[in-house]
């Protein structure tokens, strides 16, 4: 059961968060890559609502069930490109920043696949999804609500 409707009670910051998400979603990184990143961060954060949302968006975009199932174990899966792998690794490091401290090796890998501008926008996307995850988990947002 949802604890409270943070989207209604915090309407102004919620709108601003949505605007930032929209800016990043309309950038040059591509829908599928961003949705993979959002799915992985949501898995790490245990956000059922966002896992459901981003897996559904990927399905709608034609992503295979195999790849969707493998996101959680992407390091062992052979179905992700070098760019996707770098993005997923960066996502994990940024999402778990208190533990990972975003090691230099992860940065080097990501910066080998993304321009500085792309990496900046990828990081903003990760920060936005982490904020969405934290709100949804804290207030127990029900998937699909």
Image (spheres, rainbow, N blue to C red):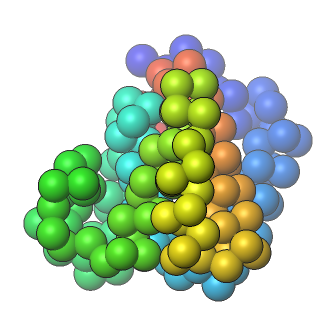
Q: Would you say 95 lies left or right of 19 here?
A: left
Q: Is residue 73 left or right of residue 85?
A: left
Q: Quadrant of residue 76?
A: bottom left
Residue 108 visible within the image: yes
Report x, y in % for residue 111.
60, 69
The picture quadrant where one finds residue 11 is top right
* In the displayed structure image, the side of residue 75 where residue 114 appears, left or right: right
Residue extending farthest to the left is 66
Q: Name which residue lies at 49% across and 64% down.
A: 109
| Of 20 and 114, the residue lying toward us | 114
Q: Nearer the viewer, residue 117 or 50?
A: 117
Say if residue 24 shows up in the picture: no
Location of residue 117 in the rendering, given as x and y in whole percent from the top left corner: 75, 75
The correct choice, above or below, for 7 with respect to 81 in the image is: above
| Image position of 31 with respect to 108: above or below | below
Q: Residue at x 15, y 61 (%)?
A: 77
Q: Position of residue 119 (x, y in %)?
A: 66, 67
């Amino acid at each position: 059961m949802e604890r409270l409707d943070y989207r209604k009670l915090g309407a102004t910051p919620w709108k601003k968060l949505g605007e930032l998400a929209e800016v990043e979603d309309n950038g040059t990184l591509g829908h599928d890559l961003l949705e993979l990143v959002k799915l992985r961060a949501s898995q790490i954060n245990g956000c059922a609502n966002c896992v459901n949302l981003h897996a559904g968006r990927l399905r709608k975009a034609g992503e295979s069930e195999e790849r969707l199932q493998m996101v959680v174990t992407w390091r062992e899966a052979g179905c992700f490109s070098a760019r996707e792998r770098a993005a997923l690794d960066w996502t994990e490091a940024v999402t778990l920043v208190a533990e990972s401290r975003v090691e230099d090796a992860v940065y080097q890998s990501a910066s080998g696949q993304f321009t500085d501008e792309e990496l900046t926008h990828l990081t903003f996307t990760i920060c936005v999804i982490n904020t969405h995850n934290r709100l949804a988990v804290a207030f127990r947002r029900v998937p699909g609500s």
